[in-house]
Image (spheres, helix red, strand yellow):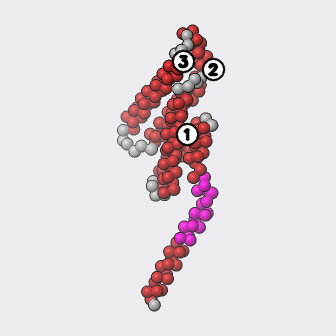
Amino acid sequence: MKLDQNDHDSSLAELSERHRIRRRCLLNHAALIELLELPSLMDACMRSDLFEEALNIAGFSNTLERRHQDSNHVVSTVVKQMRSRQEDLRQYLLYRLKSSVTMPECLELVTALRRLNSIDLERQSETDLEGLHEQLEQKLRIDFLEARDVWLDSRSSTTPEDFSATIERHRTT
C-alpha cells in the first residue's frame, strides 16, 4: 500500500507542477502573443519602408537572446525568425539601392545598412571587434558600389546630357 501512496503523491506533484506551468503561461499570455508577433511586425515594417522601426525590433532580438540564452525554446525560435527577417531587410535595402533613389533616400538606406551591421556586431563575442567592424564596413562599401553600378548600368542607354541631368536631379531632391 505504501508503494501506491508514493505513486499517488508523485502523480499529484506532477499534476500540480503541470498546472503551475500552465497557469503561469496563461498569466503571460499577452506577452507571449506580442513576442510571437515580433517577426511579422518586423516584416510589416520592412514592407512599409519603416526601417527605423524594423531596426529597433532587430536590436530587441539581441536583448532577448542575451536575456534568455537558449534557455527558452519559444524565445530562441522567435530570435531565429527575427534573424531571418533581418537578413531579408538587408537584401531589401540593397535592392532599393539598385533602383533610382534620391540622395536623402540613399543616405537613409546606407544608414539602415550600417545600423544592421552594428546590430550584428553587438551580438558577436569576439575579442577583435574593431577588425570585424572594419570587415563589415568594407563589405558595406562593396555592396553599395555594386548596387549603384547596377543602377548606373540600367541608365546607360541615356545620353551624357540626360545622365548629367539625372545625377543633378537625384542629388538635389
Q: What is the residue that sits farthest to the bottom in this orientation? A: 1
Where does residue 36 sit, x and y in percent of width and height? 57, 52
Where does residue 118 sit, x and y in percent of width and height? 48, 37
Q: Quadrant of the C terminus?
A: top right
User: Is 136 above or below relative to 60?
Assistant: above
Where does residue 55 sit, x and y in percent of width and height? 55, 39
Q: Secondary structure at mark 1?
A: helix
Say whether residue 24 is magenta: yes
Q: Name the residue tied to disc 1.
A: 55
Q: Secondary structure at mark 2?
A: loop
Residue sitting at 48 percent across and 53 percent down? 76
Q: Nearer the viewer, residue 161 or 131?
A: 161
Residue sitting at 36 percent across and 41 percent down? 127
Residue sitting at 57 percent across and 16 percent down? 167
Where does residue 24 sit, x and y in percent of width and height? 57, 65
Q: Nearer the viewer, residue 100 or 104?
A: 100
Q: Name the residue tied to disc 3.
A: 155
Q: Name the residue tied to disc 2.
A: 173
Amino acid identity at mark 1: Leu
Say whether residue 89 is magenta: no
- Alpha carbon of mark 3 to alpha carbon of mark 1: how far? 31 Å
- Alpha carbon of mark 1 to alpha carbon of mark 2: how far? 25 Å
Residue sitting at 57 percent across and 23 percent down? 100
Q: How many marks?
A: 3
Amino acid identity at mark 3: Arg
Labelled pair 3, 2 in contact (Cβ < 8 Å)? no
Q: Secondary structure at mark 3?
A: loop
Mark 3 or mark 2: name the one nearer the start of the chain: 3
Q: Which residues are magenta?
A: 18-34
